[in-house]
Structure formats: structure tokens, C-alpha cells
Amino acid sequence: MSIGETACSYAALILHEEGISATSEKINTLVKAANVEIESYWPALFSKLFEKMNVEDLISNIGAGGGGAPVAAAAPVASSSAAAAAPVVEEKKEEPKEESDDDMGFSLFD
């Protein structure tokens, strides 16, 4: 994560905490007040993100990634309703049975 991205993330969290909408001007103002130099495109990117996404949703789904990308393990969307209604059948793997001393023809205490 770059310095600009980190600074804009913190600025957006501060604005959210105060109940202020995260516009590029307000993000840029907070970053300048913190005396952090960033590239000029970062505040605009973050303000566009927060127009579409809620900060609360991003915070609560922090382990899910960037919020816009689908989860890699998600199943593809079926084109027909019959395929969507079909249950998923899991294959059961047979567990190998443990060998006992009787199977070997001798016992520990013979």
C-alpha cells in the first residue's frame, strides 16, 4: 500500500467517523493538514469509490478484498433456473481404515 493510498484511507475514515461525505476536496484537505504529500489522483479515486460503496460495508468486509471483486470461490451464475435449483452433491472420500495388531498376525503382548 502506498503512502498516498494509506493517507487517503485514513482521511476517509476520519470523515466517515465525523459523518461527513468523503469528497476529493475534503480528503485532500485532511491529507494536506497532516503534511503528507501524495499524487493528485488519489483523493479523486477515493471519492469515486465512496460514491458507490459505503464505508461501513468496506470496514465490515475487510477480509473479502477490495469490495468490488467477486469472491474467487463463488460458483458461476447459472443461466437457467433449473440448474440453479439443483442441489450440489459432495463426494465423500473414504477414509483408510487403521490396521490393528490382529491383522498383522501378532500382538504387542504375545
Image (tube, rainbow, N blue to C red):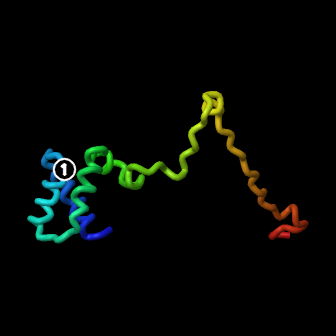
Report the number of discs.
1
- Who's the residue at 16% across and 51% down the image? 15
Name the residue located 68 percent from the left edge and 43 percent from the top edge.
Answer: 90
Q: Position of residue 22 (x, y in %)?
A: 19, 50
Q: Residue lying farthest front?
A: 40
User: Which residue is depicted at the point 57% across and 44% down?
Assistant: 75
Q: Nearer the viewer, residue 82 or 102?
A: 82
Which residue position is annotated with label 1?
22
Q: Secondary structure at mark 1?
A: loop
The C terminus: image quadrant: bottom right
Q: Residue at x 11, y 67 (%)?
A: 34
Relative to 62, 39 lies left or right: left
Q: Amino acid at mark 1?
A: Ala
Left or right for 51, reference 17: right
> Residue 14, image x and y in percent?
16, 55
Q: Where on the picture, by quarter, is residue 76?
A: top right
Image position of 1 with respect to 46: above or below: below
Residue nearest the observer in this picture, 43 or 57: 43
Position of residue 68 measured from the top left corner of the image (x, y, whole percent): 40, 49
Query: Which quarter of the rendering shows the N terminus?
Result: bottom left
Bin the neighbour count of mark 1 within 10 Å (Cα to Cα): few under 14, some 14-19, many 20 and up.
Answer: many
User: Left of 110 or right of it: where is 69?
Assistant: left
Q: Furthest residue to the right?
A: 105
Q: Position of residue 60 (x, y in %)?
A: 33, 48
- Which image quarter: residue 28? bottom left
